[in-house]
Amino acid sequence: MGKYFKLFIAALVLLVFIGTFFFLWKKSQPQPVTYEEFTPEMGDISKTTIVTGKIEPRNEVSVKPQISGIITEILKEAGDQVTQGEVIAKVKVIPDMNQLSSAEARVRLAHINAGQAKTDYEREKVLYDKGLVSREEYEKSLQTYNQSAEEVKAAQDNLEVVRDGVSRSNANASSTLIRSTISGLILDIPVKVGNSVILSNTFNDGTTIATVANMNDLIFRGNIDETEVGQLVSGMPMRITIGALQDLNFSAQLEYISPKAVESNGANQFEIKAAVHIPGENRIRSGYSANAEIVLASAPNVITLPESAIEFEDGKTYVYIVKGSGEKKSYERRAVKTGLSDGLKIEMKSGVSTKDLVRGPKVVDSEE
């Protein structure tokens, strides 16, 4: 029994050795080289670039208060439509103490002057009625009296404006009512009731009460690399795709190319802007991320070949034309002139026709 077992093991080892030798011999044999083959075809080639950016309203306005104070009421919220002059919020004035003191002093002085003017006028009227003073002197006293009365009203209005932000005589134009300066959509209201706000001045930009924009006039804003900006001209058509709305494409027209580059991640880029044409009732939100496809160059109805079939050498281009078939197949190297490329296909200006058969890259055996 042991003898037969040893013979079986020996035979098994021999079989494995022979199998391994045959496998290595088979692998060492030269394999026939095969290539892909292409027939030149007529087609259109276009070179495009993709620019990333955002959709924004052309005009976005920050509504700021005309006085400093505290927000007492907010009448609108983000997403509401407003018309020019419509009230967005109300402000309660916190008067400046120096201005308030000056306004109060002006009122007191106006009353004193008005009292004296009234006394002088009444005295002159009595004398005029008795014929003791001329009409000219009487009219001067009347004019002084009327002017003093108007000064009392003006001083009182000034005090009310300083103290309350509005006077009885101009209540409709109150600076405590924060009104939208344009018609459009409210994008943001960054304040809340109770927040203090300040007006814009030399040292401060002022508090933004609301941001309003016309969402019917949108632009695409993005940056393009310096290697491609030279191929752009104003008026070029663009195709916009919004990341959040993949099923919708919009046309746009390039209208601005920045004359100055900005550095981004070590590369020089130029800002571009394009007017976006939104079809139908599609509601686009401000700040949507978007991609703009721009056709930089195109070659319609030309002979094309896959770029992988082209051999580049010393600034020249060649192809290999297939001659014969089967075992008699051979390849003729031929100089050609190429044109526009889209990265996959390339325009063949001369050297080949649609009747030729062109050798492509080597077919890689999956077992190699």
Image: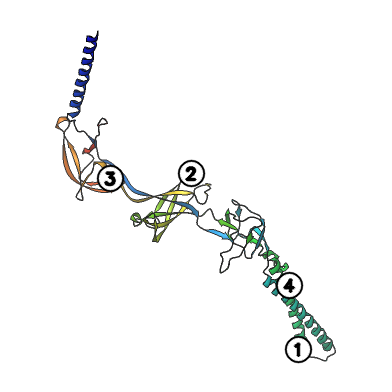
Secondary element at tag 4: helix
Q: Are marks 2 and 3 in contact (CB under 8 Å)?
A: no
Q: Residues within 10 Å of mark 4 (few under 14, many from 20)?
A: many
Amino acid type, mark 2 = Leu
Q: Residue at x 77, y 83 (%)?
A: 142
Q: Residues within 10 Å of mark 1 (few under 14, many from 20)?
A: few
Amino acid type, mark 3 = Ile
Q: CA distance from mark 4 to mark 2?
A: 59 Å
- Residue tagged 3: 346
- Residue tagged 1: 136
Q: Are marks 1 and 4 in contact (CB under 8 Å)?
A: no
Q: Is residue 159 left or right of residue 81?
A: right
Q: Are marks 2 and 1 in contact (CB under 8 Å)?
A: no
Q: Position of residue 304 (x, y in %)?
A: 27, 43
Amino acid type, mark 4 = Gln
Q: Residue furthest front?
A: 2
Q: Position of residue 136 (x, y in %)?
A: 76, 89
